[in-house]
Amino acid sequence: MPWCDTCDRLVDDDQVTDEGHCPTCDSKIVAGPKEPMPWRFRLMIIATVIYLGWRAYQGVEWLVHR
Ligand SMILES: [Zn+2]
């Protein structure tokens, strides 16, 4: 999925101009596997991992103390 750094959002493949520019701000769009993962997405994954770890810890403690 093409990502526009300037607009900080994903751009639909069919919205990207023929030159590979963003339809909104007309800046060059980086696409393909070289594109870095959006930091918001990374943050979401980290938050999910922390939450699941916390829930697992709570579950273990509940088992130990019952
Ligand atoms: Zn843009």
Image (spheres, helix red, strand yellow):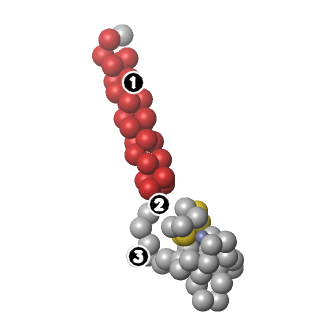
As helix, strand or loop, the secondary structure at mark 2 comes to loop
Q: Establish if 17 lies above or below 52.
A: below
The residue tagged 1 is: 59
Marks 1 and 2, how far apart at CA: 32 Å
As helix, strand or loop, the secondary structure at mark 1 comes to helix
For residue 11, which quarter of the picture?
A: bottom right
Task: Give the foreground label among 1 and 2.
Answer: 2
Task: Give the foreground label among 3 and 1.
Answer: 3
Q: Residues within 10 Å of mark 3 (few under 14, many from 20)?
A: few
Q: Position of residue 35 (x, y in %)?
A: 44, 72
The answer to whether the residue labelled 1 contacts the one labelled 2, judged by CB atoms less than 8 Å apart, is no
Please name the residue shown 58% across and 64% down the image: 7
Marks 3 and 1, how far apart at CA: 39 Å
Q: Residues within 10 Å of mark 2 (few under 14, many from 20)?
A: some
Nearer to me, 49 or 8: 8
Q: Position of residue 37 (x, y in %)?
A: 44, 63
As helix, strand or loop, the secondary structure at mark 3 comes to loop
Which quarter of the rendering shows the N terminus? bottom right
Q: Is residue 29 visible?
A: yes
Q: Is residue 62 left or right of residue 3?
A: left
Q: Amino acid at mark 2?
A: Pro
Q: Is mark 2 within 8 Å of ligand 1?
A: no
Name the mark on residue 38. 2
Q: Amino acid at mark 3?
A: Lys
The answer to whether the residue labelled 3 contacts the one labelled 2, judged by CB atoms less than 8 Å apart, is no
- Which quadrant contains ligand 1? bottom right
The residue tagged 3 is: 34
Nearer to me, 51 or 62: 51
Q: Is residue 4 left or right of residue 51?
A: right
